[in-house]
Amino acid sequence: MTKALEGVRILDFTHVQSGPTCTQLLAWFGADVIKVERPGVGDATRQQLQDIPDVDSLYFTMLNHNKRSITLDSKNPKGKEVLWRLIEECDVLVENFAPGALARMGLTWEKIHAKNPRMILASVKGFGPGRYEECKVYENVAQCAGGSASTTGFRDGIPMVTGAQIGDSGTGLHLALGIVTALYHRTQTGLGQKVDCAMQDGVLNLCRVKLRDQQRLQHGPLKEYSQFGEGVPFGDATPRAGNDSGGGQPGRILRCKGWEQDPNAYIYVITQAPVWEPICDIIGEPGWKTDPNYATPKARLPHLNEIFTRIEAWTMKMSKFEAMDILNGHDIPCGPILSMKEIAADEALRATGTIVEVDHPTRGRYLSVGNPIKLSASPTEVVRSPLLGEHTEEILRDLLKYSEEEVGEISGSGAIGAVQKFAAE
C-alpha cells in the first residue's frame, strides 16, 4: 500500500497549532513535511505547558508527528541560500506567521512563484482583508470573531468559548483541504497558487447553522429553541441556546445516576419525531402518544422543559451507559458525555487508530490523537515528532545534495544549529 500524498514535499514554516495541525495531517497522508525551526529555540510549543523538565511538551509532540526538523537561520546568508534551495525542491510552503512577516523575510509570493512556479503558498491568517487584517489572532479570539462565542452558553449567562479548538485546529483542517485541492489543480495546469484561510472564516464555516438561524429569526421566533417554550421574547440576533440541538430536533443534556459526584454522569438525548412513541413508553408516559399537547412535534414545542424534566427523571435512575443501551435499542439518538479519561481508555478508539500510543526518545511513551480520516488503501502510521534539528544534516545531504564538506561549511557559518541526536535502543 502506498501513502496517498507520497512524493509531495511540504516546507513547513508553521508554529503553535493552526499550521502544525494542517501539516501534520498532510504528513499522516504520506507527504514529506520538513519543519523549519530557529536554531536553539524551535517551535515555541516545545517549551510551552511542559510536564517534564527539558523535554518537548505534549503540546508540541501531539501536533508534529511524521515530520522532519531542520534548524535554519534565515537571516544568515548561508541559511538564506539553503532556504531558497528548499523552495526549489518543495511543492508547498505552509506558514502561519503574523501579517507581513513572510514578506519581511523576502519570501513574497512573486519571488517564490518566480523561483518555483509549481509551488503552492498556503497561509493561515487571523482575519481576511478588511479592518482587522493586521490583527493578531489566537484560538479564543477566532471563536469570538467568528460567531461561535456569541451563540455558545446559556441565555442568561455571558458568551462562552468551546473547548474544541475550532479556531486553530479547525482552520488547519480547512487549509489542508485547500492545499490538496491546489495540488490537484496543479496536475492540470502545472502551476502553483496561493491558498489563504482566515481563522475567522474557518470558525464561521463551522457555525453556519447559527447564521441560518439569524436569517430565520427575521421571519419569526426560533420555535425549537427552549426560550420559545418558556415564553421569552427573542432579540434581533441569534441567541445562546444552552444545550439545545442545533439541527431542529429538540435535544438536551440530562443527568444520570451518580451526577452528584461525577461531573460527567450525563447523557445527551434527542426527541426525534420518528421515535417519540418508544420514548413515551420507556419513560412511563404512554398517554403522551395521543395527548394533543404532546402527540406532534409542533404541539410539543411549548412543553420541552416539562418533557425533558420527565425524561431526566428516568435517566437519573441508571448510569449513562445503561441509559444509552436502552435508548439505542429503540434507535433513539443519544450519546454519553465522555470525559477525556474515559476517551483515553476507550479500546475501540485505540483499535481504529483514533487514539495511539507513541514512543519518544526523551519523553517515553505517551498518548496522542491519530488520524481521524481513514483511507482504505492508505493507512496512517503515526511516527513520533522530531527532536529540534534532528534531520538537518540528512536534509542537506540527501535532498539538497550538499557534500560533507559543504555541510561542514554551512554548519560553521552559523546558518544551522546543533543537531539533536539520540541513541536508538
Image: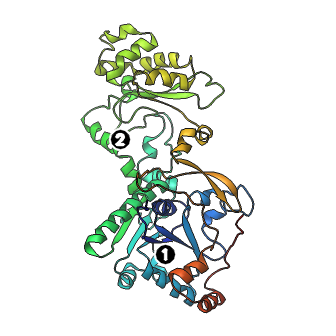
Q: Amino acid at mark 1?
A: Ala
Mark 2 to mark 1 CA distance (whole Å): 37 Å
Residue 55, horizontal then vertical, whole percent: 71, 62
Residue drawn at the location 51% of the way across and 68% of the way down: 14
Q: Between residues 136 and 190, which one lies in front from this camera angle?
A: 190
- SS type, badge 2: loop
* Residue 192 drawn above or below residue 140: below
In the image, is 327 to the left or to the right of 53?
A: left
In the image, is 187 to the left or to the right of 384?
A: left
Q: Amino acid at mark 2?
A: Ala
Residue 124, horizontal then vertical, whole percent: 44, 64
Residue 12, horizontal then vertical, whole percent: 50, 70
Q: Between residues 230 and 88, which one lies in front from this camera angle?
A: 88
Residue drawn at the location 43% of the way across and 59% of the way down: 1
The numbered mark, 2 or 1, whose residue comes first in the sequence reads: 1
Q: Is residue 138 visible?
A: yes
Mark 2 = which residue? Answer: 237
Q: Is residue 74 visible?
A: no
Quadrant of residue 277 in the image?
Answer: top left
Mark 1 = which residue? Answer: 101
